[in-house]
Amino acid sequence: MNAAVIVFPGSNRERDVAAALARASGKAPAFVWHTETELPAGTDLVVLPGGFSYGDYLRCGAIAARSPAMDAVRAHAARGGLVLGICNGFQILVESGLLPGILTRNADLRFVCRQQHLKVERADTAFTRAYQPGQVIEVCIAHGEGNYFADPETVARLEGDGRVAFRYCDADGVVGGRANPNGSVNDIAGVYSEQRNVLGLMPHPENLIDAAIGGTDGAPLFAGLAQAA
Amino acid sequence: MKARVTVTLKTGVLDPQGKAIEGALGSLGVAGVDSVRQGKLFDVELATDDPAEAEATLKAMCEKLLANTVIESYRYDISG
């Protein structure tokens, strides 16, 4: 698998995700600076890492979404190429129009940093093929603006088309309520594009790939991508 | 030309920051506040003197960057 990690000023999780990708696929990803206008030849997967691109100025991900590299990412997605946006990467994907909706300030206004359970909605995508449908996984979250919002028609369309990737749940798999850390509509933690080749999610699977540092529930996402690409 | 762009949340979009400010005003004893909505304001200097061109530029900058029209609406006032 040839992966490319786009690095923006203020990205800070690019090395974490590079480690996860290298461990899963045996090949280190390329780092691509945001001013580049092309992706490395043969790129299968583009990753937009977490962090605070441009210091979250204006709106989270808003300025990064307009950078030159994102035109190349849009073209890659239009060709059916895989794109994964994690945390700030998810914010960049919605700001760039590659995914619908927006991520707004957490409902309780607090930055939330904790372990979090998610329900895997479907296991027939390039991203979740190494999970079981309905599986409950434990990863971590760290964000102040993860409150997913879209108008009711868009939410209905996402639900109807099976484009919700992950939902916030508790350890027993009960979705929502106190398990929803940020007020996201329908407890949505991640969404797919129409063709399911683009995934954005707020949680950090790349930080749960080693039993020595909290668990390995994030590893199948990268293993699945390595198989798919 | 100078212009002022105001970006505000659309009606019905939850504004937790506005709510927190509203609560703080209450606890400061500022009475008579029904609600507070927080927005953004941009003062822009444009290179043109043509109002039509200025308006086109302002509309483009709002649509492309200053506002996210999923949740925000915008207005601009050209002050000459």
Image (cartoon, coloured by chain):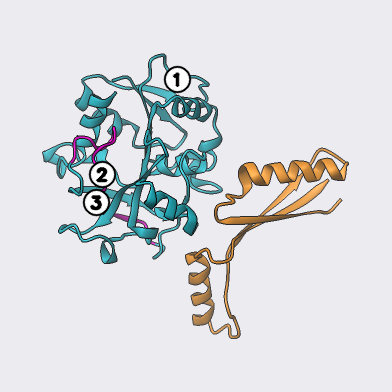
Chain colours: A cyan, B orange
- Span shown in magenta: A110-131
Q: Find residue A14 and name its label.
A: none
Residue depth check, mark 1 versus mark 2: number of the one nearer the observer: 2
Q: Nearer the viewer, residue A102 or A14?
A: A102
Q: Dot 3 falls on which chain?
A: A
Q: Judging from the image, what secondary structure is the residue with disc 2 in?
A: loop
Residue beneath label 3, please?
A118
Label 1 – label 2 distance at C-alpha? 29 Å
Residue beneath label 2, please?
A122
Percent x, y of residue A220: 19, 35
Q: Judging from the image, what secondary structure is the residue with disc 1 in?
A: loop
Residue depth check, mark 1 versus mark 3: number of the one nearer the observer: 3
Is-magenta flag for residue A122?
A: yes
Q: Are marks 2 and 3 in contact (CB under 8 Å)?
A: no
Q: Amino acid at mark 3?
A: Leu
Give the mark nearest the N terminus, 1 or 3.
1
User: Is there one chain holding both mark 2 and mark 3?
Assistant: yes
Residue beneath label 1, please?
A39
| Image-quadrant location for residue A124 | top left
Label 2 – label 3 distance at C-alpha? 12 Å
Percent x, y of residue B6: 68, 57
Percent x, y of residue A12: 37, 37
